Image (spheres, helix red, strand yellow):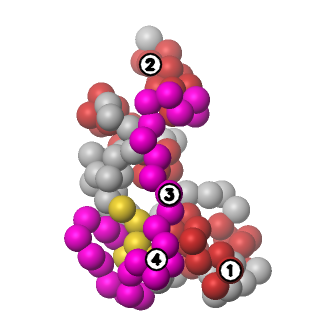
Amino acid sequence: MKRLMIFCFLFVLISGETTTEEPLPDATSAVPGSTAGNTAATGSTAVPCVDTITDCKKYLAQCTDPNYQDLMYKKCRKTCNLCNACLDTDERCKKWASNGFCTNPFYQQIWNECRKSCGFCK
């Protein structure tokens, strides 16, 4: 039953029916190394400390499950207390970091996907 609930949760997240996605913040919205209001600093961009779905409290158990940590960081950041989490949310981050992704301003809008590999957090 638990697996079915998790599958349904993932299906809803992927289908986007209940999401309230916000666009990535503008690169000029934060000063490097600073935080403003409800944000977590990452390199020179700020990530809003918000949940992007409305029913995150139902999935609190997944907040600490390593299998779901990346997903919960993306969808339930505030509820899971992951606003300052030092992790990568894309499996390709290590490769990207070794190819200059973290220092190329062209990729600045998505640096927060690779906070750990880029060295933007401890």
Task: Classify 71 as above or below 54.
Answer: below
Q: Residue at x 57, y 71 (%)?
A: 109
Task: Give the foreground label among 3 and 4.
Answer: 3
Task: Classify 2 as above or below 66.
Answer: above
Q: Amino acid at mark 3?
A: Pro
Task: Classify 107 as above or below 74.
Answer: below
Query: What residue does disc 1 label?
Result: 106
Query: What residue does disc 2 label?
Result: 5
As drawn, the residue found furthest toward the top would be 1
Query: What residue does disc 4 label?
Result: 45
Residue 91, located in which quarter of the rendered image?
Answer: bottom right
Q: Earlier in the sequence, mark 3 or mark 4?
A: 3
Task: Give the foreground label among 3 and 2.
Answer: 3
Q: Is residue 92 visible?
A: yes
Spatial CA distance of label 3 from label 4 is 13 Å
Query: What residue does disc 3 label?
Result: 23
